[in-house]
Amino acid sequence: MNALLRAEGIVKRFGGFTALDTVSVHVAAGERLGIIGPNGSGKTTLMNVIAGRMRPDAGSITFDGAGLGGMPAWRRARLGIARTFQIPLPFGGLSLHDNLRVPLEQQAEADPPGRANALLAEFGLARRAGDLAADLSQVELRKLELARAVAGGPRLLISDEAMAGLSGAEIDEVLELLLRLNARGITVVMIEHMMRAIMRFSQRVICLDVGRVIAEGTPDAVVAHPELRRAYLGA
């Protein structure tokens, strides 16, 4: 596989607890990868290690063939690794427009105001451009979180439970945004509990349980895997 991202043998411990136990994940350029697993299975920890928010105790990560080593999160973002978070934390006292200008100016965007307006339109937020981020609904917060991640010009986008707390129609809105981003060339890794979203979005699915990969394959194959059923439903 022509992998954009390779995480090999990742181990992460917190005291005596092993959150990731020799986990290996490869993501192809342009792929839509879904990552599932019960609470506490290590999904977000793995993404934190990949994005540079945590250092692994063992293992290696390469992005487009270059080793990331101890590279901090901001440098990985400059290389093209972006992520969203389970709980969006925009600058609540700034307008949506200014929330986007912050990452755009960090990227030395030639026209931050114009690009911010374009992103707001793309994510269905143009009418809220001058409103404070603190006044957004849950689905609008999720869209702003995605827009802020895309403002950095990522090649790999990690979406961490972007649909948590949303209604069925709102989930479909966010799914369409992620599918459009992928269609224009952004590789997307999506962490989700909602199997409907995972099944619709993913080309390939990895299931984690207690810090290990227990199943990997097409969505249909992984859903039918006995280890996944055991992890979610019990023996």
Image (spheres, grey):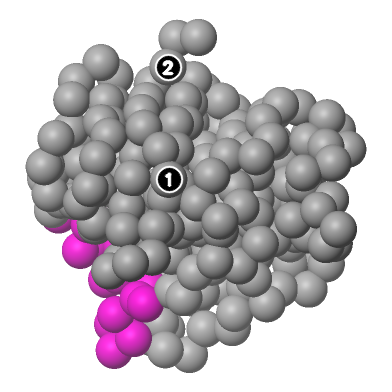
Task: Give the residue displayed 12% in from the left and 49% down from the top.
Answer: 72
Q: Which three-letter amino acid code belongs to the residue tagged 1?
A: Asp
Q: Which three-letter amino acid code belongs to the residue tagged 2?
A: Ala
| x and y, in percent, of residue 167 in the image | 78, 73
Task: Give the residue displayed 61% in from the left and 52% down from the top.
Answer: 209
* Quadrant position of the C terminus in the picture: bottom right
Q: Quadrant of residue 2?
A: top left
Label 1 residue SS: strand
Residue position for label 1: 21
Task: Give the residue displayed 56% in from the left and 25% down from the top.
Answer: 31
Q: Which residue range is magenta in the image?
A: 89-105
Callouts 1 and 2 close, C-beta under 8 Å: no
Q: Quadrant of residue 68?
A: top left
| x and y, in percent, of residue 218 in the image | 76, 27
Nearer-the-camera pick, 49 or 85? 49
- Would residue 111 be seen by someone viewing this image from the given angle? no
Is 116 left, or right, of 199 in this rendering? left
| x and y, in percent, of residue 99 in the image | 30, 70
Within 10 Å of the Cα at label 2, are there few (<14), some (14-19), or many (20+) other Cα atoms?
A: some
Residue position for label 2: 3
Nearer-the-camera pick, 175 or 204? 204
| x and y, in percent, of residue 147 in the image | 43, 56
